[in-house]
Amino acid sequence: MNSQLKWKFAFILAVLLVCIFGVIGVPTFPTSWAQVKGNLAKRIQLGLDLKGGSHLVLQVQLEEAIGQRCDQAVDDLTKQLRAKNVGVGEIRRVDDTHILVRDVDSNTSGGFRDLVSNQFTEWTMAPAAGETNGYLLAMKPSVVADLRQASMNQTLETITRRINALGLTEPTIAFTGRSDDEILVQLPGVGDPTGAKAVIQAGGQLQLVRVADGPYASEAEALAQHGGVLPAGTTIVPGKNESVAAGQPSGQVFYILDRSPIVTGQDLRSADSNPSTESPGQYEVDFKLSTAAAARFGPFTEAQAAIGGRMAVVLDRQVFEAATIQSRIEDSGRITGGFSQESAQNLALVLRAGALPASIKYLEERTVGPSLGADSIREGVRASIGSMIVVMIFLVFYYRLSGVNAVVALVLNLVILVAFLAYAGAVLTLPGIAGVILTIGMGVDSNVLVFERIREELRGGKVPAPAVDTGFDRAFHTIIDTHVTTVVSAIFLFLFGTGPVRGFAITLIIGLIANVFTSIYVSRAIFDFHLSRMDRQAQLSI
């Protein structure tokens, strides 16, 4: 054997050892089959259709996000008109995309129109039908479309962070492609998605707001104390009554709060759950604010502390606590409320991941049992092994000793593919197994191309060595052309597909790349080794 051939086999052996290590790790001696299977199971991640788990389809209530933008515009418009002394009778939201402004003072109507035109560029303004000195503001369709897309992207990103924080293995979180407001969530290995659903669906909208008045036993009482009309810039928010007798269920009370919060969940830098220092056995959530939020929060709390003011911690439109501010607070705070360890951890997780822009609704929920996964694996493995055996028998029968060469290349191709899945942490799904089987078929096709070219050269009168050289050279371009076109198609499947489709694409891509290596490089090395040991006049077994 010449030195060049030795280096080829050394490289092939190195690739084989790296692949074996990726599949089963460093074996211990003595190594049992059960240990090998255990190592393989740890390294090959299975998808939902093989491992079992939960399949959820979520619908994002985008109208809520659009309505919130409309409410925000109403508040901003009210404040700016008051600051510019522009008199109006009423400003209210008509629906998710329209605002009605009634009885604009004719003396300041020019200032009103200038303000809307310059500061509220996302809205179009027109006279309101049936209203004297009334105007109807409509959110532009392009703004609505951008807001819908931004809300979907934020929801997808937020849910992804929340699910990843739970430590689940290889979840699938993507748009369904069926509708512009649906998201697919697949959780392999999660038989009961209750905990994950609670974390996904939690709103997580934290606000720190000044308490204007309260608590009151009912909304009617709160309104009655102010002559039936809330003070400007305030709203009524429900909360828990923590002063009820011990052992009794906490009742509901109502607070009058400023409509505009001082700090929101977007201002959080971190949030963690810790044991309560005041209530043994209970937990609280400690949070830290960003530098910009601390710059606002410090002066606010200092001013409130001087007058004995109160601040409410509002989470998802409910007051968790309303405490009197004792001194200046810079960049940290805490949320108490009789949390258990799990509920405090989930709340901290939700706050860290950020708030959903709108609520979600579950359109579909399926649980795939592990028995189905076991059946799928068993049948898929049987199909793969069966196809391999049939192909091997055909190759050896039809191409004789050269068929053994092709069998070795196919086995190495399969080992490389499985090793890549292990190293990359890719998820193997049932379509992925189909990709493996298709790769086997492509590998057979490549070997058939090479062998038939060699047969043609032998029939033309060439001796084995030149026939092998010419056969590989002529088949090389054909193999590259067919593989490149298939790889390009698989790349498009990976880029635009979701879930199992991408699994099929990635196994096909890696399998085809490995196939070029095995059918050209490995198979050629085996032929060269065989020819180096043959007599010049001997016939090639093909």
Image (spheres, rainbow, N blue to C red):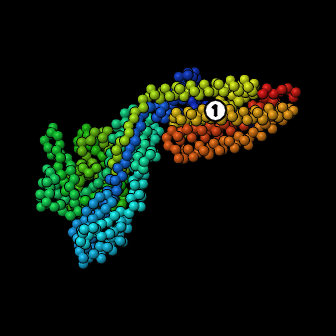
Instruction: Tell me where residue 186 appears, x and y as whole percent.
Output: 43, 39
For the question of whether residue 433 can be seen, the reply is: yes
Find the residue positioned furthest to the bottom. 107
Residue 249 relative to residue 413: left or right:
left
Q: How many marks?
A: 1
Question: For mark 1, does the 10 Å Cα neighbourhood hold few (<14), some (14 to 19), or many (20 or more) residues?
Answer: many
**What residue did someone put label 1 on?**
440
Q: Residue at x 68, y 38 (%)?
A: 517
Decide which of 19, 193 is in the foreground and name it. 193
Query: Vertical placement of 470 versus 332: above or below?
Result: above
Residue 71 relative to residue 377: left or right:
left
Instruction: Tell me where residue 173 appears, x and y as whole percent.
Output: 44, 43
Q: Quadrant of residue 261?
A: bottom left
Find the residue positioned furthest to the front. 130
Residue 57 relative to residue 105: left or right:
right
For the question of whether residue 27 can be seen, the reply is: no
Q: Quadrant of residue 185?
A: top left
Query: Vertical placement of 13 versus 176: above or below?
Result: above
Helix, strand or loop at label 1? It is helix
Query: Vertical placement of 247 versus 122: above or below?
Result: above
Q: Residue at x 39, y 57 (%)?
A: 147
Q: Quadrant of the C terminus?
A: top right
